[in-house]
Image (cartoon, rainbow, N blue to C red):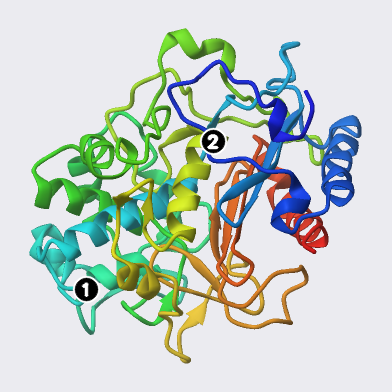
Amino acid sequence: MNAQTAALKTSAPQTPSLPQAKPEAIGLSTSRLQRLSDAFKREVDEGTLPGATVLVARKGQIGWFDAIGRQSPAASAPMAHDTIFRIFSMTKPIVSIGIMQLLEDGHFLLNDPVAKFIPEFADTRVGVESGGKLELVAAKRQMTVQDLLRHTSGLTYDHTGNGPVQQLYKESRLRSRKITNAEHATMLAAMPLVCQPGAEWNYSRSTDILGRIIEVVSGKSLGAFLTERILAPLQMAETAFSTGEQNAGRLAEPFAKDPWNGDEVKLFNMLEKPAMESGGGGLVSTTMDYARFCQMLLNGGSLDGNRIIGRKTLELMACDHLSPDVVIKGDLVPAGHRFGLGFAVRTEAGIAPFLGSTGQFFWSGMAGTFFWIDPKEDLFAVFMMQGPGQRQHTRSLVRNLVYAAVE
């Protein structure tokens, strides 16, 4: 399929395309964008990933949208513009916008305690390892809604470390898709925190709890709220917590075993409707659906006359919300970056080992999906694949190649 969007074809016309332009008309280089596609074709040929899509837009128009390789290594179907992907943690920015919509409606303040909405969080304890044993100490303060948004809540994930708190997570049913959001929140509230609220940035189940707060405040399921307030207004018709059997031939799948280390790769079934609508990582989507979300963000909160979030609210979300003494655990926030309310934010022109602009904000998904918004260049990009072990490599690669095409 020709990479230029003038030839864009899709079997899902219910999701409207964004305006399209020749690359040079919006300050991009066709030849350099072709190098972008060629680089990922080499990655496919080398067996790094089955296939990918990459979309680059600038000045409100798509300049490049290519589908490369195959949807699935077990089938012959080529990757397509309307292929459906598990976006995992790219769910988080959507849910973060949702919770901030409720803030704009006046339902809470950012420094309100989580226990105001989920009482089980009123008596959380902090797990401290001492002499090889886990001791529980009182929290110095309660976690707040702002803590959840910026991942300073003291919650964690079981895959981000091997400490005693992570071990408790692993031994629990927290990863089950068969429990409800309410059951998940109750279960999580009974577990110790990995640190004092506000002391560290730990990637965590915080956004799952934001999803539960949305349910408590709105009186609706998370999926129903997101559809009503974000997905339907943006015409993101194919973004949901599962997809129908009629779309079985459009699903992106990973290699059965990681091509670099041989580990088995297991991802959730997109055709199965889960009991838990995970605000932290449960949505499936298409490249164009997510591009519409990105264009809304780049526009300052609105698209096609529909305002989703206030301009000043979005400005707040895309700022650094970590105080200088907060310890950033793990490698998900790159050098030269900090974290806002639902997004990582680039704060330094240098330091990071890849191209970009200060002020850009972004996030990614565990299976390899990635997006970023660059207000300085009036640009956004969406990259989709299903290859968990290669996600760090492809994130840096696509950044460098897209910025190399900016004129």
Which one is in front, 196 or 20?
20
Report helix, strand or loop for mark 1.
loop
Q: Position of residue 341 (x, y in %)?
A: 38, 68
Q: Report whether 111 appears left or right of 17.
A: left
Q: Report whether 72 appears left or right of 328.
A: right
Amino acid type of the residue that numbered disc 2 sits on in the rendered structure = Met
Q: Is residue 369 above or below residue 4?
A: below
Question: Is residue 138 in view?
Answer: yes
Quarter holding the C terminus?
bottom right
For this orientation, the residue located farthest to the top is 246
Amino acid type of the residue that numbered disc 1 sits on in the rendered structure = Leu
Which one is in front, 372 or 320?
372
Residue that appears at 58% across and 11% down = 249
Question: CA separation, marks 2 and 1?
Answer: 32 Å
Q: Is residue 286 above or below residue 362?
A: above
Q: Report whether 208 appears left or right of 238.
A: left
Residue that appears at 36% across and 41% down = 234
Question: Is residue 190 in view?
Answer: no
Q: Which mark is residue 120?
A: none
Residue on which disc 1 sits: 110
Report helix, strand or loop for mark 2.
helix
Which one is in front, 243 or 23?
23
Residue that appears at 47% across and 43% down = 292
For this orientation, the residue located farthest to the front is 25
Whether label 2 touches label 1, CB < 8 Å? no
Q: Position of residue 320 (x, y in %)?
A: 46, 80
Q: Which mark is residue 288?
A: 2
Q: Which mark is nearer the camera, 2 or 1?
A: 2
Q: Is residue 44 above or below residue 210?
A: above
